[in-house]
Amino acid sequence: MRTKEQLIKNLEDKLTDIERQQNDVEALEARLNATVDELTRQKAEMDKLKKENEAASQIAFSVSLANSGEIYRGPCTDKTLVFKRIFSNTGNAYSQSTGVFTAPVNGLYYFSFSTYGYNTHVMGAILMKNGVRQISTYDYTSVDGSDSSSNAAVLQLAAGDKVHMELWDNGRVFDNLNGHTTFSGFLLFPM
């Protein structure tokens, strides 16, 4: 009788042990499924970020003032230079109608520009970020025939920041299809 009771007790203990192990396996399976779901979600997020990063890194423009003939710009009240000849505008962040580059993403951007003018007026331009002067070129009236200058800067921009070129007060620049007065920029890397 004792052996039968011990056998029943051993079987009950083993059954309890099997039920506990089965619960442990089900808990592990649930955790594994949750981990797979999380990894799937993270992969989808990584793929989305990768696509956004690839698209964001394709931002560059290069323009000159004149798209035909010759153009003298300045002196004038609206000093914003609107560059009409588009060499490239990847990402469409530069507006040909306003002359303003609008940063599509947070990042570090490189800008360069060149100006050309004649000795009758102040020659040069100012790189503006959100209405604040950053760097410039400048040459005062002189007896020489013409002046040219260039400058460049790396600026940290937030998405929506605006960069454009302005003339100096009473300034004037010249351009023709030789591209003397130019403005260029590109995204170095997003931040």
Image (cartoon, rainbow, N blue to C red):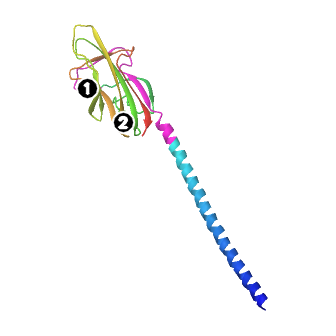
Query: 10 Å neighbourhood of mark 1: few (<14), some, or many (≥20)?
Result: some
Q: Position of residue 151 (x, y in %)?
A: 33, 22
Q: Is residue 105 magenta?
A: no
Left or right: 133, with 156 as reference point = left
Q: Identify the residue position indicated by label 1 in the image.
A: 79
Looking at the image, tell me whether mark 1 or mark 2 is earlier in sequence order.
Answer: 1
Circle 2: element type: strand
Q: Is residue 66 magenta?
A: yes
Name which residue type carries label 2.
Answer: Gln
Q: Which residues are magenta?
A: 51-80
Report the disc number at residue 171.
Answer: none
Q: Position of residue 129 (x, y in %)?
A: 30, 33
C-alpha gap between disc 1 and disc 2: 24 Å
Q: Position of residue 152 (x, y in %)?
A: 35, 25
Image quarter of residue 91: top left
Task: State the quadrant of the C terminus.
Answer: top left
Name which residue type carries label 1.
Answer: Lys
Relative depth, front residue between 82 and 143 = 143
Q: Identify the residue position indicated by label 2 in the image.
A: 156
Relative depth, front residue between 132 and 164 = 132
Task: State the quadrant of the N terminus.
Answer: bottom right
Name the residue rendered at 21%, 13% in the picture.
Answer: 141
Image quarter of residue 136: top left
Q: Nearer the viewer, mark 1 or mark 2?
A: 2
Name the residue rendered at 32%, 29% in the picture.
Answer: 164
Query: 10 Å neighbourhood of mark 2: few (<14), some, or many (≥20)?
Result: some
Circle 1: element type: loop
Name the residue rendered at 68%, 75% in the picture.
Answer: 19
Name the residue rendered at 39%, 32% in the picture.
Answer: 109
